[in-house]
Amino acid sequence: MLGKLGLTSKLFGQDPKLTFSTSPRRGVALLASSSRIPKTDSAYWTQYFTLFDSLSDLITLVDANSLNKATEENLKTLVEVTCDRLFELLGQDRFPKRPNQGGGSLLEGFTAALSGDDDDDARQAINCVRVLTRVVPYLTRPGPDGTLSDLESDVFWKPTRVRVRKNSSPSATTSSASTKVNEDEADGEAGHFVLEDEDDDDEEVDTSARSTANCASRATDLADQSEWHQVPPLAERLLAALVDLAFVPGLTVPEECRAAEGGSIAYVIWEAGIANPSSSSLPPSPLPILSARLEVLRLLNILFSVPSLVTPPHLFPVIPNRWRQAFVSSSINRKVVLCFLCSILNTALNAGLPSSTDETDAPPQSPSKGKASALLGAASGAAGIIGGAVMRLGAEDVRGLLVSACLQSLSILLAQHHIPSSDPVTEQSPRQSEVNSFAYYVSKLHRTSDFDLVVRGVLHVLDQATNESALAIPRTVVGALSGATGRNTTTRKTTSVNADVTNALIVLWRMLDLNPKLWKWVFREKEELSSQLIVLLVAFCLEYKDDETQLGVVRLSAFMLQSISAEPGLSARWNAPVEMKLSLRSKYGVPGTLADFLVVSIYTLVFTTKGKLAPLYPTLVLSITNASPHFKQLSTFASTRLTQLFLAFSAPNFLLMEEGNPRLVYYLLEAFNNVIHHQLSDNPELIYAILRSHQRFDELSKFTLEMGVAEARRLKAERKLKKAAVMAHTEGEMVEVGTRRRSSSTSGATEEGDELSEKQRGKRRQRGASLETISVADLSLGPTDSSVPEGTNETDPLESTRASEDQSRRTSLDAGDFDEDAPFVGKNGFVPGEAWVASWREGLPLDSILIAISELRPLILDLPARPPPSSTQPVSSSSTAIGLLSSASLAGLLPPAPSPKSRAFIFNPQSTTWLASICYGNQYLAAYELLRDVPVALFAVAPSARSRSTTMVEGVRGAVERVGRGWRAVV
């Protein structure tokens, strides 16, 4: 109100924020000055520690244009001065020291605010973090070969020496020297450690021999009393300081954690959970503490992300991320690593538990530097309001952002990175993974209570994302800035749920991969948890299969599913009834077992995505093959879908379209062999479906290139004819409908209402359709253009036995319609040859299947015919045939049963780069306002005509997917 009336400037002078943003001499514009701002200009640099009330303030006042115009020297000085101030604050005995600590009247607080002495240490420390969060991305630019730029190397990674007294301990040396890092200023700064006073500037220069001798003697004494010490680079000291800042009593942990003897650091785990049982729970964390933790994690995540964001994908496996590598290396103290790891783990995994945040007992925050705001805050007694009129986020909103930041940190720290090696990488000497202290301690978890917290915590995050309300949230870019900007936003509702899902999946996958005991506990001892995880992974694939911006979640879920399906300990679980919550059952429910759900869901993913998931076909099919030795009593519906999948993949035009397509047939044949050798009598429905499709197996055994090309061209021409007929029929219907509309304008209102209600009911039925109601007649493996495999007949890809025999004898088109000498050209210019066909045809595992067909098919030849497998509603098998097959035995007729092959997903440099691009892409979206000017090279950011937020989500995620399209799962 005072500001609107113009009384503010009259009473207290110019607003310091306005002065900072507009003054060319004392504001942010001074950074662009050609002259270097000296580090000793404390009046100017102090503004960066005391002026800002939030990160949004900083972004507004220190805008991107100002930073782009700033000179490198001044940006370098800003970073160094900010780090110096942060190190100095952390070196205090009882940091933070708040103003008026220990009491004081309201009048005293008001007087301190007016005098400008109200800036507390906590405020300055957080502003130091904010300034670094804002400025560091502008200093981290890649060199021409993708390595560090000269500026970043000079600021953060330059070796530093300082001169200290000889009797100082190395630890004291390192601590004191953290504020003085420039080698070129070491002589001048040595006085901070050695000299008590300086020469008077006005003293006349004495050129006498006696004065010269005295100076020489003094220099000799200085050399005798001091020595040079090497200190870590600024980057390493900054990372150590940020970790310390995460455990400051009164700032990032409750004040009650401060030791009785004082000290500014208390390494205590933030929340109950791993290594911190609930019986020793900490006091409730007030909102300012959660906000301070969020600020620290945000800066750490940016420091870890920017180097990888600016690295091209082809250089990612060979150029290290020095910030992340320095943080995860074994040089960090063991206690610090454990406290930090357990703190972020427990915060992320406790997201589903009741919040431990207490807003009512929040310690007061300092008033704003602005004197008008200080007057308003003091006069109203609202010492907890930052900036007077700035509205705060709720505790649950900040906690939600903190959980997201913890998940982001965990995914980056645990994600696999390769380290460069001077030796060439070969199969005999593969590239080693980096030394990662966080991954090491994750691998050492062994308590079942810790396992339970990890798995249930991640499952809760995943389960929350499957709620209908969560899936309906617009997937917009949300700056992680919201936690501290002071904007009145519903942060948790706008935070990307899908980013949390992706990060949670990465964290769980890495923890399972790193800790064999955790893997064994989940998949061999806790069957209900393993079943729940499998259902959620399949549900994510089904939910996001049509959303190109979320294909990363689909791909990640599919890879995890492949690895989990290779676990032999799940043998009994595959045949147990599938359990899922009502919201999932209504959309994706399939009667029967978990194996039925898996088969039908993968069939749906293949046939309803029109080739968009083609790179994932091997992964999805291998999930079925891995689990197939354990299938028992596979349902009629699932058996039909599995044989339909085989018939589609073994169609000649699909086989010849790409070089890798025959392997899909190989994997499915392997699945059939597993059932025939290990579960023959327990799967009569699947055996019956195989017998009805016997002709395709015979054709595969004698498949030739000539036969395949002729059949592929015939099907393509037939499809064109059918498409033309459908278009002609549609045009005729449109004319007829128009005529009917003109002649039925006098229809009664009652009939119209009945018609509309019937349409509405039809739409409801369509929306509520489950996986069971998908018609094969409406499915295809992809479009019919030349860019996608032609491997399916869109109207009816599968035919009954007798119809198939008739069709194979029929020639629907004249030979003159094709140029028989023209080579068949598949996708991406692939031209199949006879040698290529022979190479995979001879290796197909058909022997056991052909023996089973020859021995069992005569038993059912005389039974009544059954609707073909392409029918929309499969009919239950003849009880007589099922009874015969249930008691059938091929003992002594089949070749020796091969051992089932389990193929888990195996990472290679390409897949490692892809997974890293997912991690850092999420971070880029979360901190877009801070990283928008970073020259991203790890993936492409595509422009869009729509809103900026949607543009970035689609651009980043779509580009991230393109990183992984050039490779396939290693099998």
Image (spheres, helix red, strand yellow):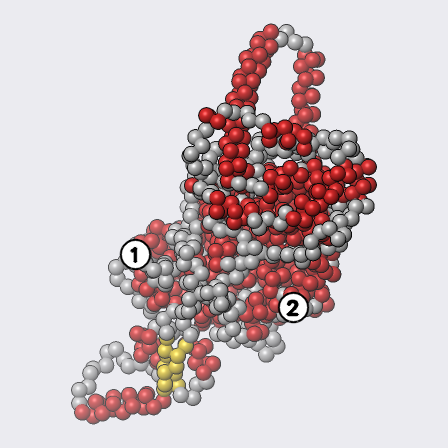
Check residue 103 in the rendering and tell me which mark sits there, or answer none.
Answer: none
Please tell me which residue lies in front, 530 or 115: 530
Instruction: Give percent across and percent down for residue 661.
Output: 53, 45
Name which residue type carries label 1.
Ala
As measured in the structure, the alpha-carbon distance from the residue carrying label 1 to the one carrying label 2 is 52 Å
Neighbor class of circle 2 (other Cα within 10 Å; few <14, some 14-19, many 20+) is: some
N-terminal-most mark, 1 or 2: 1
Please tell me which residue lies in front, 47 or 375: 47
Instruction: Give percent across and percent down for residue 33.
Output: 28, 58
Left or right, 334 with reference to 948: right
What residue lies at 60% left-to-right and 29% top-to-bottom? Answer: 809
- Corner quadrant of residue 568: bottom right
- Give the position of the C terminus as an image quadrant: bottom right
Asked whether residue 423 is in view, the answer is: yes
Say what secondary structure mark 2 lies in: loop
Instruction: Give percent across and percent down for residue 236.
Output: 45, 70
Look at the picture and state if 932 lies above or below 301: above
Task: Please identify, in this view, whether the residue under mark 1 or under mark 2 is nearer the observer.
Answer: 2
Look at the picture and state if 771 lies above or below 131: above
Name which residue type carries label 2.
Leu
What residue lies at 67% left-to-right and 56% top-to-bottom? Answer: 898
Neighbor class of circle 1 (other Cα within 10 Å; few <14, some 14-19, many 20+) is: many
Please tell me which residue lies in front, 88 or 330: 330
Check residue 32 in the rendering and tell me which mark sits there, or answer none.
Answer: 1
Look at the picture and state if 312 lies above or below 768: below
Check residue 445 in the rendering and tell me which mark sits there, or answer none.
Answer: 2
What residue lies at 55% left-to-right and 14% top-to-bottom? Answer: 732
